[in-house]
Image (cartoon, rainbow, N blue to C red):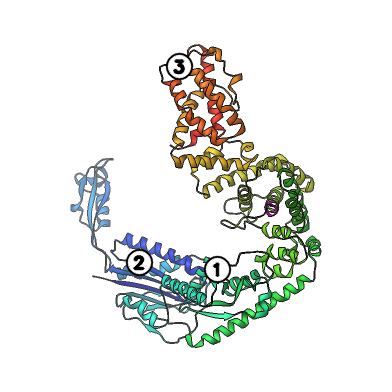
Amino acid sequence: MAATFLLEIGTEELPADFARLALPQLRERLQRDLKEWRLDHGDIQVTSTPRRLAVLVENLADGQDDLQEERKGPPVAQAFVNGEPGPAAIGFARRCGVDPSALEVRPTPKGDCVFASVLVKGQTTRELLQNAIPTWIDALQGRRFMRWGSGDQRFSRPVRWLVALQGDQIIPVALQGSDPVVNSGRCSRPHRLSSEVVELSNAGTYASAMAAAGVLVNRDQRAQVIREALGAKAQALQGEPDCPDSLFEELVDLVESPTVLAGAIADRFLDLPPEVIVTVMQSHQRYVPLRRPDVATDPLRLTAREVLCADFLLVSNGLDAAAERICRGNERVLSARLADAEFFLTVDRRQPSAERRDALDRVTFAEGLGSLRDRVDRIEWLTAQLLDQLSLDAAAQSAAIRAAHLCKHDLVSQMVGEFPELQGLMGGKYLLEEGEPRSVALAVVEHYLPRGAGDHLPSSDAGAVVALAERLELLLSIFAKGERPSGSSDPYALRRAGNGVLQILWNQGWRLDLLQLLQAAADHWSALFPAFQVNTSGLVADLVLLLRQRIQSQLEEDGHGVDLVQAVAGEGVTDGRLLSDPMDVLDRIRLLASLRQQGRLGGVQAVVQRAARLAEKGDLASSVLDASGVVDPARFESPSEQAMFDVVTRLLPLALSRDYQALASALDEATPALEAFFDGDQSVMVMADDPQLRDNRLNLLAVLRNQASQLARFELIQS
């Protein structure tokens, strides 16, 4: 026989993130144990609401089948004494529950041993679950676990009830560590605003019985209901819901009986910047703003009137009869929060941004690294160094210098103090209001980009320059201080800063000698912080190592094959090659990926590798690209040698100029010449007895290898 199994862990209101984290843990443990117990079953559902975690297993077998086991005992020499079972055999038989006469002798790789055939009676599912359920609950992990009362039970929130049913039968379970002790039964709790108890007659009726009590227990169904209701309500209000995935997932885990309601923003608050209103709604109140359709995104908008609808949406867990009261209450709460924001904005507007910049001198950046004002000075210095290398127009240079000077002023503003998420955005808006050029204000906004993986990148040249300077300043300062990211510990997000440097350079397509910049900056930082006793060469080496790792990691995250990443940025590629122009790395791997997609990479690789394998027998340096000084045409004995010499002569300017597309095509076209050199009627013996002749031919192949290595280390590419 088989029946549906239900486990419901009823609690006080759970944190939304715990519900999401607990479900995969429960599923994994359940699947593992059912497999280990050899119990047949149907679909497994693991779901949650704010007040419960629930497991449903359909068609769970009533018990295990009996299992016939063959158990190995001691060797025959130890088991028997004078042909009769000795103490070792008797003890083994006793442990297996069989008579010593039932033992059998069988050969094994280590000699004859005694074996016992043991019938293991299967346990009932009820027995197995009774013992396992408390261990499942104890094994769940999460943040901020708690104890309650005088018990020692730990959980995200106090456990208040437990339902454990196999079909219509209760599985007796007690959580002894809970205070009071929680015993399993068939009674669940309905919506939190209802006082009635839901008595479950059978595990299979769980979802329908809870729905009748106002609880939509299936999380996926709840998500679908909320998604459709948000869309329908937004359409009716002629807006587009601004509901990021993180907010949506949280809303699903905050309600048991979702209802989407609409509230209104008081008209005066639409004069606030749109990001202020959205931040208050999403981050602080879990509301869903409605954006006006077809309005272009502009981070420098000063008011929300053209961006946001006057209405907003909220996902309620209340009763339908109280909908009007819920809306009015949430409107009052929102108005209070927006009134605070309005006050902060008014206070900030009374102080010029230049004064706020001076006030940064009173805020410590990090121990030993001075104030935020000192940090801004370092960002300005790096901005100037970057502009010396980059060929930007005068307007972009001027905007970058001014933006670097003012980039952190809003960190001491009232608004950013209350809403840290708005740093940069408010700084740019305040500057625009004060009459600074739009390019400067936009650069201040964009110098925080990207904030993380998948975020937008700066759209303006000035913003990109200051964003680079800001990340390089962080890396240089923290590394000069002697701190490094290690393992999962990276409190200053240095790896993210390294990724940001590369993403910005690659997005802008800028040719920047990053190694030269780091060397100059290391000297400057050494002078700035004599107390750190900075070893400049060591500082540069550590930064180069981090950036090398970030290049490899970022290329892999962007979807490039590991072998291609190693071929263009692996250990054999020098630091200078990687960081004297990080854009060069991207150019090469994109070409290799394109050749692979076109099916042409294999042909190029075959040409290079055949030459490289023999070239390793010579001693020509890998830096030699010109054959004229190391190959003597007068020693050629075959036209195939002259043909190969002509190939490397054609490849030379392409390798020197790093015209990778043409270099790859020329290598592909060199296949006939290489085949003639090795295999044709006019082929030659590379490893000739004459050492001068042999070296001449090895050098010819080595030059071809070296020229190809300007594109990639082909020996690391998988066919």
- Give how far across and how far down residue 305 sits, in percent: 65, 74
Give yes or no for residue 463 being in the magenta stretch: yes
Figure check: 278 above or below 701: below
* Quadrant into which the N terminus falls: bottom left
Figure check: 86 above or below 705: below
Q: Is mark 1 in CB contact (under 8 Å) with mark 2?
A: no
Q: Residues within 10 Å of mark 3 (few under 14, many from 20)?
A: some
Amino acid of disc 3: Val
- Give how far across and how far down residue 230 sits, in percent: 49, 74
Which residue shows up at 45% across the image and 16% down it? 685
Q: Closer to the N terminus: mark 3 or mark 1?
A: 1
Q: Which residue is mark 2?
A: 44
Which of the 4 quarters of the picture holds residue 442?
bottom right
Q: Which residue is mark 1?
A: 144
For marks 3 and 1, give the one nearer the viewer.
3
- Give how far across and how far down residue 596 sits, in percent: 46, 40
